Image: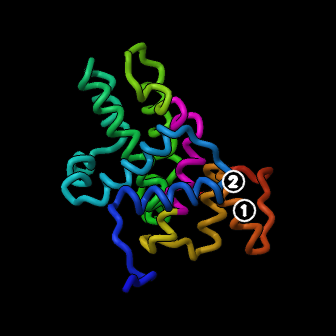
Amino acid sequence: MDDPLLREQTPAEYFKELVESALSRQHLQAAELTEYYLVNLLCEFIRPEARATRRDDGEALALRLARALDSGGLEQRARLRSLGDFSLFMSGFFSDHFRRGLVDVDYYVSMGEYAYASLGRRDVDDAFTDVFRELAGKFVGFMDVLSDVSERTAVATNSDLLRTYEKWLRTGSPREGQRLIERGIVPNSSIGSKFVQ
């Protein structure tokens, strides 16, 4: 007898469904290869050994970027990709945890956008060049997709209304703006992020 509540899925199948649904809810178009990249990124970050190698012992993102730019060739590509992936994952899955740190989600957004844009500008024959361009150009949108997946997997939730507003002010995220509207608050972009501490 088949139990409809239980079904076997690989992590890739599971995340593919979640990413496709999140893209639809966020009204974000993504190339098929970019969608695959996001699914693969999530699959990699669920493995503890992958998370450990991507952290670089807590080194600041700006230092990781400088080290990447000082290197060359394949090492530079690997470092930029690791920085972009880490920034996207952290800003999407754990943005609410930045409130107690020295940096906020906008720092991760700017580092990730820069890393992916650098990879997208390379004149290397790489199948992922267009993916990196799309990730850089729609970083906040893809961050929202990962936030959506995070909420659906109960890894993190946004329960603090003020924090949601601060995140919207810092990133201009359409998803966070919509969440504010759903809670009865109309986002006011004229205030600007200079008032957010």
Q: Residue furthest front?
A: 1
Q: Which mark is residue 137?
A: none
- Name the residue type under label 1: Gln
> Which residue is located at x 42 percent, y 51 percent?
39
- The amino acid marked with disc number 2 is Pro
Asked if 189 appears above or below 163 in the picture, the reply is above
Task: Return the x and y of residue 138 as percentages of the image width and height.
Answer: 59, 40
What residue is disc 2 on? 174
Q: Residue at x 78, y 69 (%)?
A: 185
Give percent across and percent down for residue 44: 30, 52
The quarter of the picture where the N terminus appears is: bottom left
Name the residue furthest top.
Answer: 123
Residue stretch in magenta:
133-148
In the picture, which quadrant includes the C terminus? bottom right
Residue corresponding to mark 1: 178
Look at the picture and state if 138 lies above or below 191. Answer: above
